[in-house]
């Protein structure tokens, strides 16, 4: 129910059709996201990231855009947990990412993981 409700709500807010305009993140922009999101990880230095291009033709709320990426982090036993999708928002100034905020993802809960993937797909991100 939660998965369906979240997917319907997000799809009602934004519909992305066809090809989206996107650009790769710069190394500096990646570091901004890594330093913000990585602070919550057990071993940030060992985290593996899969970076998606930043979809730039989203309906914009001020200077924030949705941004999704995948991360493979270590658990308390030192093993990798597998790549998981993270949904967040980036703040831009003059088209450059200057901040990041976590929204959802990277949980062991399958419903949250599915909802996060649906949110990302609605904004034009696929993995």
Image (cartoon, helix red, strand yellow):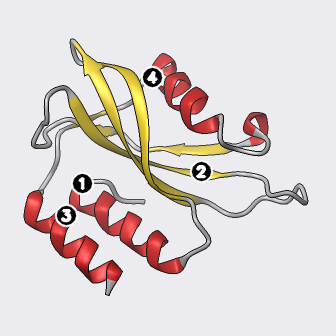
Above-or-below relation of 60 to 11? above
Image side of residue 3 versus residue 58, left or right: right
Residue 80: image location, x then y, percent:
78, 58
Badge 1 marks a residue whose secondary structure is loop
Residue 17: image location, x then y, percent:
9, 59
> What label does residue 29 carry, if any?
4
Give the residue pinned by disc 1. 124
Residue 96: image location, x then y, percent:
30, 17
Give the residue pinned by disc 2. 71
Farthest right residue in view? 77
Instruction: Estimate the spatial distance between the alpha carbons at disc 1 and disc 3, rounded to whole Å.
Output: 12 Å
Instruction: Estimate the spatial distance between the alpha carbons at disc 4 and disc 3, rounded to whole Å.
Output: 26 Å
Circle nearer the N terminus (1, 3) = 3
Residue lying at 10% horizontally and 59% vertically, measured from the top left: 13
Instruction: Estimate the spatial distance between the alpha carbons at disc 1 and disc 4, rounded to whole Å.
Output: 19 Å
Give the residue pinned by disc 3. 10
Observer-side mark, 1 or 3, equals 3
Answer yes or no: is residue 68 visible.
yes
The part of the image, by quadrant, that contains residue 75 is bottom right
Callout 4–callout 3 Cβ contact below 8 Å: no
Circle nearer the N terminus (1, 2) = 2
Circle nearer the N terminus (2, 3) = 3
Work out whether residue 49 or residue 2 is closer to the camera in this orientation and state it: 2
Answer yes or no: is residue 17 visible.
no
Residue lying at 62% horizontally and 71% vertically, measured from the top left: 108
């Amino acid at each position: 129910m939660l998965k369906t409700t979240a997917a319907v709500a997000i799809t009602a807010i934004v519909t992305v059709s066809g090809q989206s305009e996107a650009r790769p993140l710069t190394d500096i922009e990646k570091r901004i996201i890594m330093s913000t999101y990585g602070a919550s990880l057990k071993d940030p230095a060992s985290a593996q990231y899969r970076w998606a291009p930043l979809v730039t033709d989203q309906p914009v709320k001020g200077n924030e855009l949705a941004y999704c990426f995948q991360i493979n982090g270590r658990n308390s036993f030192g093993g990798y947990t597998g790549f998981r999708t993270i949904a967040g928002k980036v703040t831009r100034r003059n088209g450059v990412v200057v901040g990041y905020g976590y929204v959802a993802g990277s949980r062991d809960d399958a419903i949250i993981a599915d909802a996060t993937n649906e949110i990302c797909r609605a904004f034009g991100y696929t993995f």
